[in-house]
Image (spheres, rainbow, N blue to C red):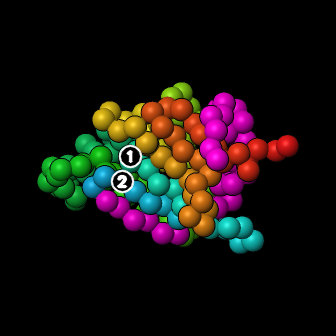
Amino acid sequence: MNISINSNQASEILAELLIGGVIDRVVYYVTGWELRVTQPGHDELVLYCSELRIPEQRTWEEALKLRPFCLAPGNEPEDTTAAIAVFNVVNSVPVTATRLEAQGTLVLRFHGGRQLLLPGVVEGVDWTWQLDRDDENLFTCDSGEIFVNSALLKK
């Protein structure tokens, strides 16, 4: 059963689960992303999110309009920049820190200061991100509120 949790408690548990993990599989849909996180000696985790962003979003979008890239505007240009950032860390750069920001945004920090943002509030979407293990939901962010599987809470 999942229950509402405050961001401090959630941050501690998320750090235990994700720090040291490496994203080794990425699945993209127009409506979201799946990021598999693995690390030796731990269970495989899957982060699902409706949006994935980077802090330098606008800078990257502008740079990709220039040579040598010259990417034509597409349906989801912000997803192109997020994909480049994700593939820059896939299979090689572990998560070094996690942070929960205001309104449930999950920040994954990687070596070298690289970051991925999973927004906690997305216009027109209620469920925004979740973390699963073996098809069991561990965390869900629903319109900024964080819910955790009660089995993860330390007694």
Three-letter code for the amino acid on which mark 1 is drawn: Glu
Label 1 crowd bin: few (<14), some (14–19), many (20+), radius 10 Å: many
From the image, tell me which residue sits under label 2: 32
Q: Position of residue 46 (x, y in %)?
A: 54, 61
Residue 40 visible at all: yes
Q: Is residue 24 left or right of residue 99?
A: left
Magenta-span inclusion, residue 34: no
Residue lying farthest front? 1
From the image, tell me which residue sits under label 1: 51
* Residue shown at the point (66%, 30%) measured from the top left: 6
User: Relative to the observer, which residue lies in front, 88 or 48?
Assistant: 48
Residue lying farthest top? 102
* Residue shown at the point (68%, 59%) measured from the top left: 20
Q: Is residue 60 above or below residue 45?
A: above
Q: Is residue 116 left or right of residue 134?
A: left
| Residues at circles 2 and 1 in contact by the CB criterion of under 8 Å | yes
Quick one: quadrant of the C terminus? top right
Q: Position of residue 21 (x, y in %)?
A: 64, 61
Q: Position of residue 103 (x, y in %)?
A: 51, 29
Three-letter code for the amino acid on which mark 2 is drawn: Gly
Q: Which residues are magenta?
A: 1-29
User: Relative to the observer, which residue lies in front, 3 or 67?
Assistant: 3
Question: What kind of element bears circle 2?
Answer: strand
Residue 37 visible at all: no
Q: Quadrant of residue 85?
A: bottom left
Q: Quadrant of residue 98?
A: top right
Magenta-span inclusion, residue 15: yes
Residue lying farthest right? 155
